[in-house]
Each structure stands twice: as structure tokens, then as C-alpha cells.
Image (cartoon, rainbow, N blue to C red):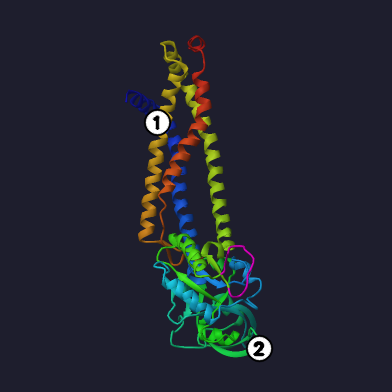
Amino acid sequence: MKLFLFALKNALRSWWRTIIFGIFIFLISFISIFMGAFSFTIRNQMEDAIISGLTGHLQIRAGNSENDDFAQQLKSRWKGAAYLDAAQLKAVRNVLRAHPDSGTVTPRVRHGGLFISDKDKASSLIIGLDPGSTNYQDALILVQGRMLDPNSRHEIVIVESLAEKLRVEAGDRIGVLSRTRDGYTIDAAVTVAGIVQYRMLSLFSFSAVYTDIDTARELIGYSQGEASDIILYLKDKNKAQTVYRELLAAFRRAGMPVVTGEEKPIAAEGIRLSTYKSMGGFFMGMVSGFILVFYVLIVLMLLIVSILISNLIFMMGIERYKEIGTLRAIGFSKFETMRIFMTEIFCVTGFFGLLGILTATALNIYFSIAGMPSPSAATDFIMGKRLLFRIDCTQILITLGLLFGFTFLASFLPAYKACSLRPVEILKDT
């Protein structure tokens, strides 16, 4: 306690240096906590967009389908995509019914199509949805019109970039050209029910067209009961890996051949089981790259501040030259003197670090309730109108560890040098 009070007295005596040192610490802790919560929120929002709009938490496809990564599959534009026949769908559903955590189960049909308007034409992925499925809406921002009507057929919802290329609006009729799995060409007309933007996925110029599953089956020549895949929506995405392992074992017990991950395709009679993490590998990799850049910038900022702190501690040592000599002369060892010096530094680090953490946390809590407003219409597809923050409590512990770690590394050497002088030399100079 005496050591703490003595350190506090020293800090107050050189209050202006203490304030400068504290501002550096405050800024590091504030930026780390605030931007940590922002990047954590963006990462989760990307996961939610992939889950809701594309993959679900788990996806089951035919065993002869290609790799897991959704972006890699897009290279083929879904031509000749593998499918689950009625018997496979029934067998899969039987296994899923016996699993208590299988969540909401919905079939989908996916393939490529060429959309033709009076002005232009463009190809896009078509996703056929079960009439009762509304999860896809969570990944979209409605720009014009409405979402799909569960009771209507031959309606589509298209992304804004595709609508601009085709120069169409909600309510317009356009043509779609598709090829069935048997090689026959299908020419149909559909109505644009709505125009949307993808949350996050628009960053990658991702384009897809949503329609009802019967229209999608008609365009690719699937019969009733056939689908490209089965999507599972769980109540808690953190359980996805656990449910994945349990279902993998359940399918194998049922005698169904199963492949996972990057394993090579097998016979069509088998199935491929994937999680949203493997299916969204490319998209999540890009987001992780952006977040990595942020953390690199944080580390660079810590290094710069560490140099400033080191210089500041060196100047503090010069200012307390006489005081250090007196302590050494009356019997304090080099390490005891240094302990006093370092205690002062850690007290200032702890106070201003906690102040920065508490300020940033309070702001994060506010944004988690009220949301951070989007600064412009251009960022709406990333943040929505308001971005509701998600808070990761481990970020606080990591920030505290980084603060004390970098402060120790930055201040130890100048403090050691200041306390290493011999008392006789110091007193001779005074």
C-alpha cells in the first residue's frame, strides 16, 4: 500500500507527463475495444448473411457434388449440379426427424440461368425456396417492391446490380433461359417481385435470384420431391459443429455413404454433409483478411506508442536523477528502486487503460441497444440502416494483457538504465 501511495505521489508531482502518458494508454485501450467489437460484429454479420442467404447452418447434398466452398462451386455457374432424388430426400428426412437438434429443415433447388430483358441480358445463380422458408430475407435489404409471395409462382427477387444491368424495376416481366439436367432448353417468363441488396455479400459483387422451388424445378427439369440440397437452420449457430458430428455418425449408422469437406465426390447414392464455415470459406476468408489488417494496424500503433512511452520514461528518469541517487544512497537496491518506478508506470497504465476500456464498452453497449447509424446509403448493405453491436468480453482481457505487456516492454529498459547508475556517481553530479 505504501508503495502504491508513493507511486501515486510521484505521478501527481509530474502530472503533465502523467497526462501525456495516460492519453496514449487511453487511446490504445479505447480503439482496441471499440474496433474489436466492430470487427466482431461485422464478422458475425457476414456469417449470418451466408447462413440466411446461402448455406444454412448445415447443408446436405448429393454424394457426387463437388467441394464444400460455395465460391468455388460458383465457377461452374451450377451447370450440371448434382441433386438429391426423392428416395434420398426421404431417407435423409428420416434421419433428421430422429435428431432432436436438427432445427428447421428445408429443401432448395439451385442452378444457373440467363435472364433477358428488352435492354440487356445477364446470367445468375437461381435459388429455389420452399414456400414456407423466410430465412433468406434476413440476408437481404429490400430496395424496391416486396419479397416472394409463398402462394405465387414465377416470381423472382433479384439483386440491385442485376436489376441495373437489365434495367428493370419491380413489377416488370423478363425472360429466363435455362437448361435442364437432360440438356433441354427451357424458356420461361417471370415477374420481378422485388429488388434487393445483400448484406455483406454485395462487397464481393455476389449475385443470386430467388424464386419459389416449383419454378426452379421447372427450369432445371427436376420432378416433384427432388432438390439440389437440404438446408438446416439451427436455433444456435454455436451448436453447428456438434450437430454436424452427431448427424455424420447418424447417417453412417443408417448405412448412408457420407463425404465431408474436401473429400472426393462419391456415388450419387451417397450424401455430402457441410457446415456454413466450410461452405462460406472464401467469403469468411476475405472478411478475416480485412480483420487481420485491422489487428496489424493496432499492433503498429502499439509499437509507435511503445517508442513514445520509452522516450517519455527516459525523460522521467532524467527528471528524477537526484531522487534515484538519494534512494540508492540510503540503501535501496537497484531492483527496489526500479520497482517503485515500475509501480508508478503500471498504476498510470491501469487507471487510464481501464478508463479507455470502460468508455469504449459503454459506447459499445449503447450501439448494441440503439445501433450505430449507417453514415451513408452506400454502406447500408454492410451495416444495414443501423448496426447492432455484438460484444465479445474476452476482448477486454486481451486488451488489458496487451496494454500491460507493451507498457512493460517499452518502459523496462529506460527504467532499468535510470536505476542502474551508481549512487556515488549520481551524488557527485548533484
Badge 1: how crowded within 10 Å, few (<14), some, or many (20+)? few
Give residue 46's position: percent from left, percent from top.
Answer: 50, 63
Q: Residue at x 50, y 71 (%)?
A: 53
Whether tag 2 and tag 1 are in contact, CB under 8 A, the answer is no
In the rendered structure, the answer to whether residue 222 lies left or right of residue 319 reads: right
Question: Mark 2: which secondary structure?
Answer: strand
Q: Which residue, given by chain and number where applicable, does mark 2 sit on?
A: 185
Describe the element under mark 1 as helix, strand or loop.
helix
> Which residue is most to the left?
1
Looking at the rendered image, the quarter that the N terminus falls into is: top left
Magenta part mainly helix, strand or loop? loop
Q: Nearer the viewer, residue 220 or 75?
A: 220
Identify the amino acid type marked 2: Thr
In this rendering, the answer to whether 103 lies above or below 327 is below
The stretch in magenta equals 257-269
Q: Label 2: few (<14), some or many (≥20) within 10 Å? A: some
Tell me if residue 377 can be seen.
no
**Residue 163 in picture, x, y percent from top left:** 57, 80
Give the left or right position of residue 405, taking residue 371 as reference.
right
Q: Which residue is mark 1?
A: 15
At label 1, the amino acid type is Trp
Foreground residue among 13 and 176? 176
Judge by depth and name the residue closer to the eye, 154 or 322: 154
Please provide percent x and percent y for residue 236.
Answer: 41, 63
Above or below: residue 356 compared with residue 259: above
Work out whether 380 lies above or below 410. below
* Residue at 54% from the left image edge and 71% from the top image edge: 256
